[in-house]
Every structure is written in C-alpha cells, then in structure tokens.
Image: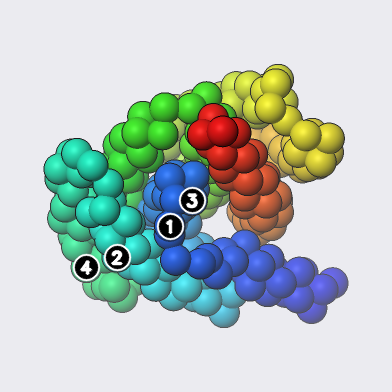
Amino acid sequence: MKAFIYCISLVLALTALPAQAKIDNLSQAINESGRLRMLTQRMAKAYLLKALDIQPAVTQQQFTKSVAKFEQNISELKIFSAALQDSAELHETINEIEKNWGKYKKTLMLELDDYSANYSAKLILKQSDLTLMACEKLVVQLEKTAQRQSARWVNLSGRQRMLSQRIAKLYTAISLSGDNTLYHKGLKKAVSEFDKALQELTDSPDNTHYVNHKLKKVATQWNFSKQGFRVLSEGSSTPLVIFMTTESILKQMNDITALYEEIDNKKKHIAKI
C-alpha cells in the first residue's frame, strides 16, 4: 500500500505543473500570472510537508520545480508586459512581486534545523501570503487589460489552483503545530472561497460540455477532501490524504484553466471580426 501511495504521489508531482510555451497573449498571461499565485502556496506546502517527513522525495521535487517555474514565469511575464501599452502599472507590480519573492526565497532556502519548526512555519506562511497578494494584484491587472468576461473565468479557475494549495498548506501547518485551532480561520475562509468559486464556474454561460464534465470531477474530489476537514475539527489530522486529494484537484483545475484560456482566446478573435 505504501508503495502504491508513493507511485500515485510521484505521478501527481510530475503532472501537476506542465511545461508552458512562451507567453504571447493576454489569455495565457492571465493563466500564467495566476500560476504564480498557486506556486507561492505550493512551495510553502512542500516545505512544511518535508518538516513532517511526508513523502520527502516527492515534496522535494515539487519544491524544486515550483521555485524554477516561479522564476521562469516572472521573467516571461516581465517580457510580455513590457510589450503592452500603458505597462507602467504592470511593471511596478512585477517589481513588487520580485521584492517579496527575494525575501520569501531566502527563507525557503533555510534548512529546517535553522529555526524551530513552528517559528519557521509562521515565517514561511507570512512571506508566502505577502508574495501571494502581489501576484494576485498582477492577475487582476491583466484581467482588467483584457476587458472580456471570459477572461474572468481564466482568472477564477486559476485561482482555484491556488486555493487547493493554500488549503493543503494551512492544513499541513495545523498538523505540524499539533494545534487544530491554529490557522483554522484561514483554512475555513479558503474552503469557503473554493466552494463559492466552484459554484460560479459551474454556472458560467461559457462552459462547454467538456468543461462541465471536468468541473463535476473536481466537485467529487472536493467533497471527498472536505471529509478531511471535518476530521481535523474533531482533533485528528490526515495530511497525507489532503496532500493527495488537493494534488488531484490541482491537476484538474490546471486542465480547466487551460480550457478557459482557449475559450477566452476564441472570444477575443470573434470580437475582432
């Protein structure tokens, strides 16, 4: 059973962050800036899971790939935004992301023994959230630049990826601390936001049959994940289960965000005709 769980986890780690082509349009830029949000939470989650010694080889791989992908996206978004009209605001926000990322990365590169586990967790969570807020600002600015309702679905579905990793991060932090009241408010809010956005995406008039099919799969996985939240409120903790289910949700939401990116691109081309 342990070998089976390891194999499943390894597959999820290798497929959850697909390689992307060079950013050359707004739909893709919204998707990839949204991926930055997710990565801020994913790196913190991986760091904390290593502290718990849960799937250390898999989480180390997630961590390494996430750091590289974050820096790649920043570089490509900087090039793309420079080509847009009135890009000063975007440039300022990217600078803000880089400033926060510099501090966050420095902390992430510390060995776990350099601080006590709880102190390290608090610092990681704080810096991951500061970087997240700057990344959120960039996505909103790019969506505003697009001026299309369909661009909102790219943003919103991409944000679900972030919430899947944020939930896993906070759940892991609670498990690490042994205090089920710690970070409970943030976890409850993230769960509520995921629920609300999933319903909004389900009700989107732009959905294709395939998008609806994928969203139903997410809803099934999500309902299973919520059982783990109920167990946590009863004083138990199942971080490995939450790790695996949120990885599955992340992969599905990656696919869905790519589908919404295609829909938005089609809307853009139709508007030009």
Name the residue: 55% across, 69% down.
19
Q: Quadrant of residue 121?
A: bottom left
Q: Nearer the viewer, mark 2 or mark 3?
A: 3
Q: Nearer the viewer, residue 133 or 225?
A: 133
Q: Earlier in the sequence, mark 2 or mark 3?
A: 3
Instruction: Give the alpha-carbon distance from disc 2 to disc 3, as whole Å.
Output: 14 Å
In depth, the one of 263 and 167 nearer the eye is 263
Q: Which mark is residue 75?
A: 2
Q: Circle 3 — which element?
A: helix
Q: Which residue is mark 1?
A: 24
**Amino acid beneath label 4:** Lys
Residue 132 appearing in the image: yes
* Label 1, label 4: how far apart the Cα atoms are: 31 Å
Mark 4 or 3: the one toward you? 3
In the image: residue 6, left or right of residue 250: right
| Structural distance between the alpha carbons of marks 3 and 1 | 7 Å
Kindly identify which residue carries mark 4: 106
- First reached walking from the N terminus: tag 1 or tag 4: 1
Q: CA distance from mark 4 to mark 3?
A: 29 Å
- Compared to 199, does 56 lie above or below? below
Q: Is residue 12 left or right of residue 70?
A: right
Among the 4 quarters of the image, the one containing residue 205? top right
Amino acid carrying label 1: it is Asp
Residue, disc 3:
28
Give me the residue at 51% from left, 34% from top.
Answer: 272
Q: Residue at x 48, y 63 (%)?
A: 46
The residue tagged with tag 1: helix, strand or loop?
loop
Question: Residue 125, image x and y in percent?
Answer: 34, 49
Of residues 137 and 187, the one drawn nearer to the viewer in this rendering: 137
Query: Quick one: 2 or 36, which is closer to the camera?
Result: 36
- Amino acid type of disc 3? Gln
